Amino acid sequence: MNNVKVVQNSVQTKEAIDEFLREGFTKGEIYLLAHNKKFSEDLTDKTDTSDIGMGEQGIFHSVANVFRSRGDELRSKMESLGLSNVDAERYEEELDEGRIVVIATKSA
């Protein structure tokens, strides 16, 4: 089961993380995505949440992401966390608009 929150800024990101923690998720089960890769990495580091890597995606998708556009990479990462292709496309559009997607999952 996935829980997804779309937020506008880092303050709302922290609030979403805190809410997921109260719901019983650990920081290792919470993932952040932003369209700007550096911002996404910095925010993940600052909030001590998980990075979507080989453990979630497998080696094939992790290596393939090197050659994908950022949009394709983001959709692939969201799908690796259990989102459908349709949902991944919808949330990628939110990322295109400058929003942040916070995903909590026990299935990754």
Image (tube, helix red, strand yellow):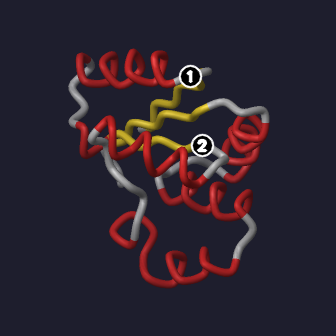
Image quarter where the C terminus lies is: bottom left
Q: Which residue is mark 1?
A: 9
Q: Give how far apart the Cα atoms at labels 1 and 2 are.
A: 10 Å
Left or right: 13 as drawn, with respect to 17: right
Name the residue at 32% across, 49% down: 50
Residue at image coords 39%, 15%:
15
Q: Is residue 55 above or below residue 80?
A: below
- The three-letter amino acid code for the residue at tag 2 is Ala
Camera-side residue: 10 or 61? 10
Whether residue 94 sits left or right of residue 17 in the image: it is right
Residue 32 horizontal/vertical position (percent): 47, 41
Do residues under tags 1 and 2 come within 8 Å of each other at their CB atoms?
no
Residue 7 locus on image (x, y percent): 58, 22
Residue 38 appears left or right of 29: right
In the displayed structure image, the side of residue 55 where residue 41 appears, left or right: right
Classify mark 2: helix, strand or loop. Answer: loop
Q: Residues within 10 Å of mark 1 (few under 14, many from 20)?
A: few
Q: Which numbered disc, 1 or 2, marks the residue that appears first in the sequence?
A: 1
Residue at position x 56%, y 22% in the image: 9
Q: In the image, what residue type sits under mark 1?
A: Asn
Q: Quadrant of residue 99?
A: top right
Q: Residue at x 25, y 24 (%)?
A: 21
Tell me the SS state at disc 1. loop
For the residue pair 32 and 20, the one nearer the viewer reads as: 32
The residue indicated by pointer 2 is 34
Report which quarter residue 51 is drawn in: bottom left
Q: Quick one: quadrant of the N terminus? A: top left
